[in-house]
Image (tube, grey):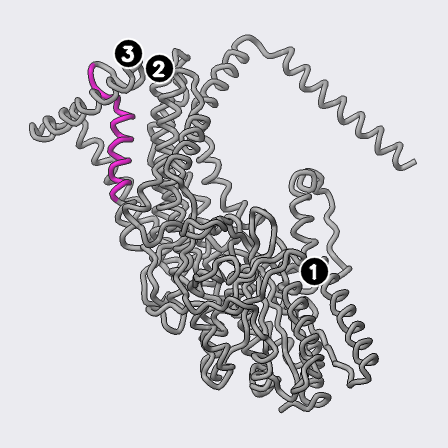
Amino acid sequence: MKQTISAIRSIILWLAIVVVVATGLRLSGDTFWQYIFVFGQYVFFLRSPLFMAALLLALPTIAEFILPSMLKNLFVLRGKWQMAFTILGATVAGMSVVLVAAIIIENAPARFGVEALTEISPLISQSCLLAMFLALPTTFAVTDLSAEEIGNKRWQGLFLGISFSSIFLFLFDWTRNFLAINNSSNPFVVDLVSGLNRSLVDVISWLGIKHTKGYIYSGKLTDEHFDAFIFFFLLLIVYLLIFQIFKPTSKPSNKKPEAAALLYVMLLISITTLFFGNLTFYFDYWRFSVLFFLLLISVLMYSLFNVDHYFELKEDPLQPNEPTDFLKLVEKRLQKDTLVVVCASGGGIQAAGWTAQVLTGLQADDCLGKSFTKAIGLISSVSGGSIGTMYYLDRFSNKGFPEDTESEQIVNSATADSLDAVGWGLAYPDFWRIISLPMLPEIFTPQISDRGIALETDWQGEMKTPNDPKTLAKWREEILEGKIPIPVFNATIVENGFRLLITPMNFGKSEEKKFFDFNNLYPGYDINLVTAARLSATFPYVSPLCREDIDIDKNYHVADGGYFDNSGFVTAVEWLNKLLEESQKSQEKKIKRVLILQINPFPKATCASQAQKNRGLFMATLGPLLTIFKVRDPIFNARNLTEVELLQQKWQQVSKACEEQEIDIQYFPIHFPNQEEAPNFYNRQGEYRPPLSWKLTQKEKQAIKDGWDAIKGKGKIQELKTLWKDTWKID
């Protein structure tokens, strides 16, 4: 009965809508349709500025409510100056949109023969007000979202931003009035502007041949085009200054100037609007697709100049050619015949921070102690977990563990912001490639040729020796001496989907198990640690897929390890199984206990998930992508539990068959605390959305530390302490 009533209501509502629309169409006159026709033409001609205007207005909403994990922290700024210049950047972007719109609205009748929009022309004349209107959403967003980061300083930043924007708009308006020939009484200004105008007219005439309508009026460039040219020239100067001042360097984040990543976004919007808007105005005369033309040019440029993204290989004559004897290495780190294997899951900077926090927290004297760290034989990490692992192992001392005084620095390094470096790389070398100028990165910034290397450079600044990059070969020396455990940074080969184990040691070859070992794939070569970690953390599209910079047969592209296995568990279990087989054959010291830790940076998935109502359109469009994201952790957790059970059963049977002491294999997943364990982190809907990008707010950084404090004395951690100190009695 309810379904019948609901169906009748739907039919009635649909018929009512049809009647209203049909009546409206019937009553509308020819004038209405003529206006719609003209309006539609201008929407087509204005597609570039309209799209950018919509982006400026909608980006804060998208960032905060639709894609918060990816974009929200773009609007969280670290100081009043970052805030001031970002607001200024948004105003400049707004002015770019208005100037291009003015070119099209004022000159489209002459160029395309369409009816003039006399009603809108007066509105376009208020360019300063329109620019500030387009900047308002960004201004409100950065003021609101930066509140917890910089407190009351945001009001200073807001005041400075509005002041800078007002000064900029005043100066630009004054400059274009000053340079207007008709308004100037200064002969020098008249001659200068006239000469510049004639030069621009000559260029336009040469490019347009006979089709200069909409550009030249009474022998000179139209005011709208001249204003846009002056604006673009000044913007280009600012663009080049930012390029030089904020180029990423290998210095700690507190010792170098950094522009906000959002400023680079605004810079890109400004330049792209002027670039594409003017191109479409020019080529629309012939109804030629600018987008198709640029794509064609980009394809040709990429092909002719062999454009790609690369990572650097270094020569390593001491690289091992034969598979490593892991049992001998592990024996140096066993604690009372006990081995620890760590798996660090991916998940952006949240994973990096949580991995570093858990590993340093477990080493603390009030938890497992230094015997835990000394017993770690292998760390298999993925994506963000690889970054946390890198900073953790970087601070190890000759004693086989990091000193307690290093713990805070390890976590701070793992959670240091790197999104600004990505923004620089995207706004400069990568943008130059997109606009078909692939030779510019090699000329102007050969050391930082894309956003991936910019990210590496930023990470290097947080290493213990920022000016002396460590490599896999250096870690190999420390592993052979028993100083550090064996790290494996898991990545994925794009061409065949195989795992790539980026590690100092030789894991051999395995077609069966579908993996490549770095030492076998690139014999005789080495790699920087930050490069190795970056390859494992090639999160799309934050950093680009890349291949080696040396022309060799194995010309593979490397992607994020999370494509294959976001937990690092497959590599760890394969290695452990083989190691236990070797241990069983050994006549010397054998492994009797194994602790497998799975570090997961997100709360454990529960059955009591929140059902989403009345989100049909959202689920129809983005639901499939949301499902892919949501099933990752449940799939990996279920699979990992099954793998552990199979491993335990196998070695129970082996021990019985050999009539030896059973190998005790224990598995402990350590998740970021859920709502019951740490309710302060969660909103009213029971959601906690840590970012996946390379930037954390101060609150989110503190949440990682507080999250560890919330779980270290209870639950799984307490069970782990009981196992380690009471059952296994390891001091």
- Pick the front one: 388 or 547: 547
- Pick the front one: 306 or 567: 306
Quarter where residue 315 is shown: bottom left
The structure residue drawn at horizontal position 69% and vertical position 38%, both measured from the top left corner, is 620
Between discs 3 and 1, the one toward the N terminus = 3
Kind of residue at badge 3 = Lys
Residue 360 among those drawn in magenta = no
Taking the image as shown, residue 575 lies to the left or right of residue 356, namely: right
Kind of residue at badge 1 = Phe
Q: Element under label 1? A: helix
Q: Nearer the viewer, mark 3 or mark 1?
A: 1
Residues under labels 3 and 1: Cα distance? 65 Å
User: How would you rate the neighbour count of disc 3 (Cα within 10 Å): few for under 14, some for 14-19, many for 20 or more?
Assistant: few
**What residue would you read off at disc 1?**
636
Between discs 1 and 2, the one toward the N terminus = 2
Residue 316 visible from this viewpoint: yes
Label disc, if present, on residue 111 of the rendered structure: 2
Q: Nearer the viewer, mark 2 or mark 3?
A: 3
> Residue 199 in the image: x percent, y percent?
18, 24
Q: Element under label 2? A: helix
Taking the image as shown, residue 117 lies to the left or right of residue 73, namely: left
The structure residue drawn at horizontal position 70% and vertical position 60%, both measured from the top left corner, is 636
Kind of residue at badge 2 = Arg
**What residue would you read off at disc 3?**
210
The structure residue drawn at horizontal position 66% and vertical position 58%, both measured from the top left corner, is 513
- What range of the chain is rendered magenta? 219-237
Majority secondary structure of the magenta segment?
helix
The structure residue drawn at horizontal position 71% and vertical position 79%, both measured from the top left corner, is 584
> Residue 604 in the image: x percent, y percent?
69, 64
Quarter of the image with the C terminus is: bottom right
